[in-house]
Image: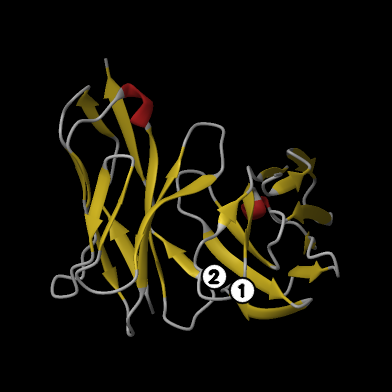
Amino acid sequence: GDSVTQMEGPVTLSEEAFLTINCTYTATGYPSLFWYVQYPGEGLQLLLKATKADDKGSNKGFEATYRKETTSFHLEKGSVQVSDSAVYFCALRDTGGFKTIFGAGTRLFVKA
Amino acid sequence: DAGVTQSPTHLIKTRGQQVTLRCSPKSGHDTVSWYQQALGQGPQFIFQYYEEEERQRGNFPDRFSGHQFPNYSSELNVNALLLGDSALYLCASSLEGISSYEQYFGPGTRLTVT
């Protein structure tokens, strides 16, 4: 079945460092891909999305490019802030499907 | 504009009991999905309701059931609780159509089974 694999955390960075969180997926069709963020004590929020190959999703300085050839959707940010500390989830949704499949999440700590 | 709301916030139940969790979708949304998030894991899809019917179900036993009301709110019922049912239960709402992938999540209900 479809699945999402993302790098294990926690990831600890200093403020203004470059962030990469790796995500790869397995899917039979042409899924849409997402990154969600979960801040402490809050629900999940959609961070960015890409619905077809080579699309780049971006929001709040975060970016991810849908790479069909490598089945990847890595999350990047050029300069992280303390306020970016959260858990990040990579997810996919099959074309025509109704469920979203999530990875296990990667916790990010950013130190001042 | 109220977002997705869930009640209760926390719940403690005993093994074998039954529980009902409630969700009100974001204003204007007509579709509700339920997810189970175990500690340290990603959310797992339980089922989705649209037009008061369950239209897709994840890999969860029949002990998990749900309902959607005419006002689009929803309930999740779990019977014969097991210790392994302890988790954060998330409700997500969306609007059927080309943006149906855009789900808004509630803060969740933390269920502890002792």
Label 2: element kind: loop
- The reply to whether callout 2 and callout 1 are in contact (CB within 8 Å) is yes
Residue at the image point whose x is 29% and y is 36% from the top: A10
Marked residue chain, label 2: B
Residue at the image point whose x is 64% and y is 71% from the top: B47
Query: Which x, y percent locates residue B61?
Result: 66, 73
**Location of residue A41 with respect to A55 vertically, above or below:** above
Apparent side of residue B48 relative to residue A39 in the rendered image (left or right): right
Image quarter where the N terminus of chain A lies is bottom left
Q: How far apart in space, not on screen, are marks 2 and 1 (Cα)? A: 5 Å
Residue B40 lies in quadrant: top left
Residue at the image point whose x is 84% and y is 64% from the top: B71
Q: Amino acid at mark 2?
A: Ser
* Front position in the image: B10 or B62: B10
Marked residue chain, label 1: B
* Front position in the image: A112 or B101: B101
Query: Which x, y percent locates residue B84?
Result: 62, 54
Apparent side of residue B82 relative to residue A87 in the rendered image (left or right): right
Label 1: element kind: loop
- Asked whether the viewer can see residue A7, the reply is no
The residue singled out by tag 1 in the image is B96
Q: Amino acid at mark 1?
A: Glu
The crowding category of the residue bearing disc 1, from other C-alpha atoms within 10 Å (few below 14, some 14 to 19, many at least 20), is few
Query: Which x, y percent locates residue B72?
Result: 78, 65
Q: Are marks 2 and 1 on the same chain?
A: yes
Residue at the image point whose x is 32% and y is 81% from the top: A30
The residue singled out by tag 2 in the image is B100
